[in-house]
Image: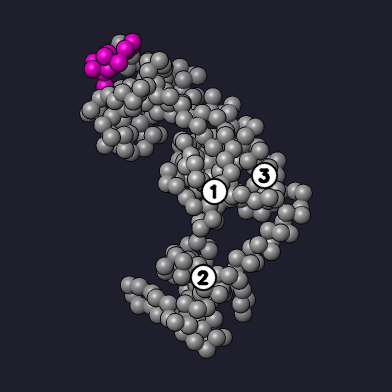
Amino acid sequence: MDRLRSIEVFVSAVDSGSFSAAARALDLSPVMVGKHVRQLETHLGAQLLQRNTRAQSLTDAGRRFYEESRKVLEQLALAEASVERLRAEPRGTLRISAATTLGACVVAPLAAAYQNAHPQVRIDLDLSNGVVDLVDEGFDVAVRIGALDPDLDLIARPLGQYRMTICAAPAYLARHGTPRTLADLADHRCLSHAVWDRRNGWRLLGDKRWPEQTDFVCNDGHGLRQAALHGAGLLLQPAILVADDLASGRLVSVLDAFAPEGRPVYALYRQDRQPLPKIRSFVDFLAEHAAAQLG
């Protein structure tokens, strides 16, 4: 029995709350997760988990073993990291968290370019608009938008500005005219993200909001982009999402003077006197190239 692997599986089963969730996280079958846990219980001569069809819970022995096992895995990770720091070449898995649209349009292509230069690095990119805890959730780098908490215990490297643009398809503008002022929006159909709609519409320069109700609502920016391309109305979306459409003329920007102010973009990583080569070099790569992508 690979006892260390079984310990890792057991800890994952406890952390994730079920054998099925641990199996997905570790790329195993639920049956194999159960086998590892049973092997540990046989080796220790004690039941670690109590399970039924709806829930699982730790026994007293399981709770004690879990606490000590977490310490063992943490010490092992520190030992591996100490050796990895000695390597000049970046290698190993690089776990990155990024906001959804920013991650898809900017971080993913830059991560691919970085990996081409450093083939020993495996990229694990998670796109979510939620805020992750780098330590608790095991991420190396988070790329986030907006002002930072002054008490944030992380290193922040500025990458550029996240800008929004208002645009529409030429066919739509030919039918409805090109708006010149915010008052002109009353005569136009406006597309809105579902989250923004619950906040009473578009947030334009100076925190002005328009309109209170929109004609087309979608919970995905790519869906709104497609609607705009097919003439559904005026679109407010990140400039990086529609950059190719604007360059090709498929969409035309309007009301540039009223677009929301840009928000800063940062790469965040944990404080460490000697960050791993994969983290240091990737953040440097982002800092060098992201501004050109953000525009």
> Which residue does the image show at 50% across and 24% down from the upper left?
244
- The residue under label 3 is which amino acid type? Arg
Q: Quadrant of residue 55?
A: bottom left
* Dot 3 alpha-carbon crowd within 10 angstroms: few under 14, some 14 to 19, many 20 or more: some
Residue linked to disc 1: 153
> Residue 139: which numbered mark, if any?
none
Residue linked to disc 2: 11
User: Looking at the image, is mark 3 or mark 2 earlier in the sequence?
Assistant: 2
Q: In the rendered structure, which segment of residues is drawn in magenta?
A: 178-189
Please provide percent x and percent y for residue 83. Answer: 73, 59
> Which residue does the image show at 54% across and 81% down from the upper left?
40
Residue linked to disc 3: 280
> Which residue does the image show at 65% across and 32% down from the upper left?
288
Residue 185 in the magenta stretch? The answer is yes
Callout in the foreground (3, 1) = 1
Label 3 to label 2, Cα distance in Å? 29 Å
Callout in the foreground (2, 1) = 1
User: Looking at the image, is mark 3 or mark 1 earlier in the sequence?
Assistant: 1
Q: Quadrant of residue 292?
A: top right
- The residue under label 2 is which amino acid type? Val
User: Looking at the image, is mark 2 or mark 1 earlier in the sequence?
Assistant: 2
